[in-house]
Image: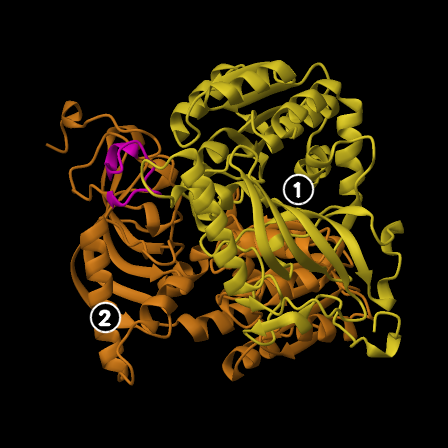
Chain colours: A yellow, B orange
Amino acid sequence: MAGDKSAFKAGCPYGTHRVIEPKGSLPQAALRLDNSGDIFDNEILLDVRTLNIDAASFKQIVSEGPEGASRSELEEHVASSVMRIVSERGKMQNPVTGSGGMLLGTVREFGPKVQGARGAKVGDLVATLVSLSLTPLRLESIQRVDLDKDQVDVVGQAVLFQSGPFAVIPEDIGERLALALLDVAGAPAQAARLVQPDDSVLILGAGGKSGLICSSVARQKAGPNARIIGLAHGKASTARAKTLGAADVLLSADATDAIGIMKQVMAHNDGKKVDLTINCVNVPGTEMASILSTRQRGKVYFFSMATSFTAAALGAEGVGADVDLLIGNGYAEGHAKIALDLVKEDAKLKAILEGMFHG
Amino acid sequence: MAGDKSAFKAGCPYGTHRVIEPKGSLPQAALRLDNSGDIFDNEILLDVRTLNIDAASFKQIVSEGPEGASRSELEEHVASSVMRIVSERGKMQNPVTGSGGMLLGTVREFGPKVQGARGAKVGDLVATLVSLSLTPLRLESIQRVDLDKDQVDVVGQAVLFQSGPFAVIPEDIGERLALALLDVAGAPAQAARLVQPDDSVLILGAGGKSGLICSSVARQKAGPNARIIGLAHGKASTARAKTLGAADVLLSADATDAIGIMKQVMAHNDGKKVDLTINCVNVPGTEMASILSTRQRGKVYFFSMATSFTAAALGAEGVGADVDLLIGNGYAEGHAKIALDLVKEDAKLKAILEGMFHG
């Protein structure tokens, strides 16, 4: 069958042919996808090894676990939640947060129209760079849940569309690090565009994965005369941000305390609000801390999936803040290379991320 | 009392002193505000005349009305919904959409710290330029509901904070037109910044209030060699956009049909995607039509309150669209003047809006 090109059906570049319900919608908005392993002419079939669940989604699933649960009970809860979601929707899209994550797997089969795409061949280890929220997925079993890394090892198959970017995992970077890094590959590419020399930059969630990456990029792009202020919550987070050393000032505070944070930021920036705020905090209710800490005509980049559109739009209006509010786009031209090059160049960042995602 | 300055309590510029629950949050995020008429030293007390409910909120309230209801039954339903929401929350913030709107009223009293703010005096007719979602409001009665204009005439009082902009209604523009215009005052100011000469611009919802305004601005800023493509749904909307005549092409289509719209837009733009898309459609699920119609490194401006943050962020990633995604900010420096000047300059726009919002 696989060798007979005429046996492949023609697919839409955006994967609408996989949408079961509602008809006519795109895969991301769909309630249910066709996750069959019979691929169309423009699809790639992958044997899935690991799901890297989006942080906001993983947190939400864990939060629904039984009260007072042990670690192994929580792992059990995550495993059954993931199985249930994937069997209901044909994709790993959290119904509450709407978000997904990405996956690591090996190429099993190419449709004839995408043969050898991006230099990959059958058997190559690749990471998908599109959200799991639109990736057809079928799971046979769950092997292991890692509560610290938001990762789930599975046996299953996934389908990649023609328009969906992916990256072959380079041999000089560990699998899990590459996966964790590529999951937020949009962050370094977007941060590199936004940060200007000598800017003052506030990074909320500076000790998390995206926050550490953005801090490293901000330091590089803004230069030695810039003022980088990192905000972290919790001991481990704060310790990581301190080890990285990219920020001039590290604040330890609750990112939902808008006015408290604005005051602390101004106190550490010569009484002024910052030019740019990058929000990487995966908890709801941090829009106003970002907006109030940013100067008139400055920019706020919301990389956190916990951001509320209306809270940001109306919140800025309510306080008369004339700031550009940007929705974090997970894709940018060349983002995988930018992310992988970053850890090759920043040895401290690489070591910290390896510590977080070894295994 | 009013003459005795020492009788006024000191308030926070952002109005946190009015938050009852949850403590420490900002008024926009609060579940309940203190709507008492005893003002603080930095507040302005208004006698409210008309509430201009946000379009997404109004639509949602109407949609919850009894099935097969008559017009007067629907008006009754809206009136009781508004009374209930305001009495529960101390502000007119729709619990489902999170959005508010703005109001028209006369100045009743100034706190001593904001005496004569923005050149206003007691008795002046003013429009608030902050969302009702954060404005303390107390209603005595509802006088009239206008289903076509999303407006509700009331007897009641509202409180303006020091940081909240407002505008004195000019005498040469009708009250209702001014109110309708100022409610979306961010739109023309932001559109004017985004549109560049010779741009191709797609405007979704081109026959609605914000869409008409953005079309007029886009034509002005982009010039005669630009390509302005308007999309409208429904007869009345399409007729208004046609009368305005700002667009080179008017498409009549459902804005949730992402791929269909992308194809139509490209067919009318020499096979290319547009430089800028402005989304003014107050229905959910139009993020992907906006993203798929916009070229790589182009911009999408989401002015619609029905926008989903995750749908936009993950949707762009899912199709590998490297576009800037902007959250519509209702505030911009000088936005009230820009909006009022626009209708003075564009007589056709003024006539159409007067037709929509005469009173």
- Evaluate whether residue A9 shows in this view: yes
Circle 1: element type: helix
Task: Count residues near mark 2 (Cα–Cα under 10 Å), then give few for <14, some for 14-19, many for 20+.
Answer: some
Q: Nearer the viewer, residue B314 or B37?
A: B314
Circle 2: element type: strand
Q: Position of residue B110 (x, y in %)?
A: 24, 37
Q: Is residue B29 magenta?
A: yes
Amino acid type, callout 1: Asp
Instruction: Name the side, left or right, on which A105 lies relative to A232.
Output: right
Q: Position of residue A28 (x, y in %)?
A: 60, 61
| Chain containing mark 2 | B
Q: Look at 43% across and 40% down and name the residue there.
A: A74
Q: Position of residue A77 (x, y in %)?
A: 43, 46
Which span of residues is magenta-colored?
B16-32
Instruction: Name the side, left or right, on which A177 lies relative to A98.
Output: right
Disc 1 target residue: A183
| Chain containing mark 1 | A
Q: Quadrant of the C terminus of chain B?
A: bottom left
Q: Look at 82% across and 37% down and name the residue there.
A: A170
On screen, residue B338 above or below A183: below
Please state which of the two labelled residues, at mark 2 or mark 1, is closer to the viewer: 1
On screen, residue A24 above or below B200: below
Disc 2 target residue: B144
Instruction: Name the side, left or right, on which A185 lies relative to B16.
Output: right
Determine the CA span between mark 2 and mark 1: 53 Å
Q: Quadrant of residue B259?
A: bottom right
